[in-house]
Image: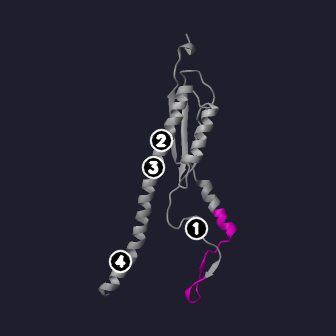
């Protein structure tokens, strides 16, 4: 092969590799930012639980509003308290569980949400496209969404503050 053909093939091989590396760098950077946002959110929830020995309804509403409007984005979804979080009043000084969780959505090129259905005309009379109907593709997407679980979970067991009026003798 001549040098120009080798150069073309090297370039053609480099392009998808460069695209995958760029997506990997983006995902690592975005995960770092997301994790620190979740860590800050967990500190707010932890401090609230330590001060009150539970998370009161008013503070809970404020934190959940912050979760939905400030934390949740296209790459971080299903931000919520963990199921073990204490929302009922506890005796002062008791151990309280508090935590937050979210799903980080990794972004890759040609994700399953981008698949097409039907056949389309290509060059030279060739056709291309998927063999699935729109309903089958939506069912596949829904099944993938159902498999997703929270992969960022930050949970603490913290001691509540003790006040002298609540101390048992």
Label 2: few (<14), some or many (≥20) within 10 Å? some
Query: Could you tell which of marks 4 and 1 lies nearer the N-terminus?
Result: 4
Circle 3 is placed at which residue position? 33
Which segment did they paint magenta? 121-140
What distance separates the C-alpha of mark 2 from that of mark 1? 32 Å
Residue under the point 53% across and 25% down: 160
Q: Quadrant of residue 65?
A: top right
Label 3: few (<14), some or many (≥20) within 10 Å? few
What distance separates the C-alpha of mark 4 from that of mark 1? 28 Å
Circle 2 is placed at which residue position? 39
Circle 4 is placed at which residue position? 10
Q: Is residue 123 visible?
A: yes
What distance separates the C-alpha of mark 3 from that of mark 4? 35 Å
81 to 50, vertically: above or below: below
Label 3–label 4 contact, CB within 8 A: no
In the rendered image, residue 12, in percent from the top left (x then y), is placed at 40, 77
Circle 1 is placed at which residue position? 114
Query: Could you tell which of marks 3 and 1 lies nearer the N-terminus?
Result: 3
Query: Could you tell which of marks 2 and 1 lies nearer the N-terminus?
Result: 2
Q: Residue furthest top?
A: 169
């Amino acid at each position: 092969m001549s040098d120009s053909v080798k150069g073309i093939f090297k370039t053609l091989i480099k392009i998808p590799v460069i695209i995958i590396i760029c997506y990997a760098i983006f995902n690592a950077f975005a995960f770092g930012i997301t994790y620190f946002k979740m860590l800050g959110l967990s500190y707010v929830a932890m401090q609230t639980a330590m001060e009150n020995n539970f998370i009161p309804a008013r503070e809970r509403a404020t934190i959940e509003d912050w979760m939905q409007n400030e934390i949740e984005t296209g790459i971080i979804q299903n931000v919520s308290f963990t199921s073990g979080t204490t929302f009922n009043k506890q005796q002062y000084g008791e151990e309280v569980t508090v935590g937050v969780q979210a799903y980080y959505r990794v972004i890759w090129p040609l994700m399953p949400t981008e698949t097409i259905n039907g056949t389309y005309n290509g060059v030279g009379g060739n056709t291309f496209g998927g063999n699935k109907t729109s309903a089958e593709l939506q069912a596949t997407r829904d099944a993938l969404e159902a498999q997703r679980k929270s992969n960022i979970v930050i949970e603490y067991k913290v001691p509540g503050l003790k006040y002298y009026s609540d101390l048992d003798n």
